[in-house]
């Protein structure tokens, strides 16, 4: 009996070991014999060494670790030479390089995200070198203006091609935290436009990786940035409003409804909310409103609310169209320039998000095959 129990225990341990999800980082770094190669995890607060190896004459290496639950960031390092890596599954990433130029001259395969991160890293290095050159050759205000212009051009490129185009990708997250001279390129504490970049990625990570530390961190950065901007712009942010923003699990929207009352999205915490971006002037609007009525009539008694953001430019027309609607309908007069469109990364209208009772974004329209089924799960 004891022998049988022991055999079963060994079998269970073996099965657990075999079922553990792993990822691999392997390759070779030549011209680095006897150098220590470190494999490190880049966390939110610190960098932790996971493994290391003393390289031989051929420079080959192989590291393995448990696959993360959401995208995580790692790096290979020899002294101050670094190769950044992203892992989001059990993939095998292969890196080949030659020391001491591995920071700029390396090849990576097995991960599209790692290829994009390489592009961003090389762009950042090039920007830093150009900034140093300007500082050395153009002192004073002229040099400062030139620096600011270069950095702004860089930010516009990265936002357009890496962040807003794919905010759910790990390389969009990576882009947000690039630095020049030890300072963040994208600064959500001082720039309203940079807050939009953080908010777009935060929204996507809230949906795809809810309750993970990185998603929560992005969300808090975006919220704190918006709070700071509101204070700077003297928008009379009260202590109660600040507390409400901190407690909210979504990026808040505060607009007037069709009766003139101010309605906040965050006030609906405790309900399942369909956040809907809509234009009543669209040809397909009547059909869509009819479908929303059916959902609302069926599930509102169970706790469903609709918070609809109209982007119609004609206020009178909007009020006519919404006079008999039973749900919350607000309007942003800035129409397609409404900040909420950027903050929620709305690329086309109509679009909607489903929010649970805890104020957490669960999914958006593109992810929902059956919105009614998703609502029923949350009620």
Image (cartoon, rainbow, N blue to C red):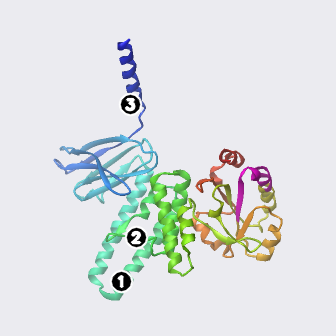
Q: Give the range drawn in magenta.
A: 293-308
In the rendering, which numbered label is found on residue 185? 2
> Closer to the camera, 300 or 337?
300
Query: Residue at position x 57%, y 70% from top?
Result: 240
Q: Are marks 2 and 1 in contact (CB under 8 Å)?
A: no
Label 1 with label 3: CB-CB less than 8 Å: no
Asked if residue 144 is positioned above or below residue 127 in the image, the reply reads: below
Quadrant position of residue 353: bottom right
- In this picture, residue 352 sits left or right of residue 174: right
Mark nearest the camera among 1 and 3 is 3
* Closest to the observer, 335 or 326: 326
For the residues labelled 2 and 1, the Cα–Cα distance comes to: 15 Å
Q: How many marks?
A: 3
From the top left corner, tell me how far across and down residue 180 is, in percent: 34, 70
Residue placed under numbered mark 1 in the picture: 144
Residue 272 on image: x %, y %? 67, 53
Task: Return the disc, 2 or 3, that comes first in the chain's sequence.
Answer: 3
Q: Mark 3 points at which residue?
A: 17
- Provide the secondary structure element on which disc 3 rests: helix
């Amino acid at each position: 009996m004891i022998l049988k129990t022991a055999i079963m225990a060994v079998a269970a341990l073996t099965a657990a070991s075999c079922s553990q999800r792993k990822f691999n980082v392997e390759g070779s770094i030549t011209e680095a014999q006897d150098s220590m190669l470190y494999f490190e995890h880049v966390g939110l607060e610190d960098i932790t060494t996971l493994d290391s190896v003393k390289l031989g004459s051929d420079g080959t290496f192989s590291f393995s670790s448990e696959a993360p639950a959401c995208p995580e960031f790692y790096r290979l390092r020899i002294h101050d030479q670094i190769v950044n890596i992203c892992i989001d599954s059990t993939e095998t990433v292969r890196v080949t390089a030659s020391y001491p130029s591995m920071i700029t001259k390396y090849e990576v395969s097995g991960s599209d995200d790692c290829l994009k991160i390489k592009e961003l890293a090389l762009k950042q290095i090039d920007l830093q070198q150009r900034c140093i050159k300007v500082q050395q050759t153009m002192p004073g205000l002229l040099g400062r203006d030139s620096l600011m212009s270069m950095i702004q051009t860089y930010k516009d490129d990265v936002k357009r091609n890496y962040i807003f185009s794919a905010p759910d990708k790990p390389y969009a997250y990576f882009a947000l935290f690039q630095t020049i001279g030890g300072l963040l390129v994208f600064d959500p504490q001082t720039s309203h436009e940079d807050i939009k970049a953080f908010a777009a990625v935060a929204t996507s990570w809230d949906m795809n990786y809810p309750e993970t530390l990185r998603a929560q961190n992005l969300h808090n950065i975006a919220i704190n940035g918006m709070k700071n901007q509101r204070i700077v712009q003297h928008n009379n942010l009260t202590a109660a409003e600040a507390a409400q923003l901190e407690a909210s699990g979504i990026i808040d929207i505060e607009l007037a409804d069709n009766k003139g009352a101010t309605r906040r999205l965050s006030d609906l915490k405790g309900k399942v909310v369909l956040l809907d971006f809509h234009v009543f002037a669209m040809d397909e609007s009547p059909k869509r409103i009819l479908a929303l009525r059916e959902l609302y009539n069926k599930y509102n008694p169970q706790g469903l609310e609709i918070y609809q953001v109209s982007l119609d430019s004609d206020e009178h027309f909007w009020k006519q169209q919404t006079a008999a609607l039973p749900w919350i309908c607000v309007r942003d007069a800035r129409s397609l320039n409404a900040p909420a469109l950027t903050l929620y990364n709305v690329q086309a209208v109509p679009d909607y998000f489903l929010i649970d009772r805890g104020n957490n974004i669960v999914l958006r329209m593109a992810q929902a095959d059956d919105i009614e089924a998703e609502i029923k799960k949350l009620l």
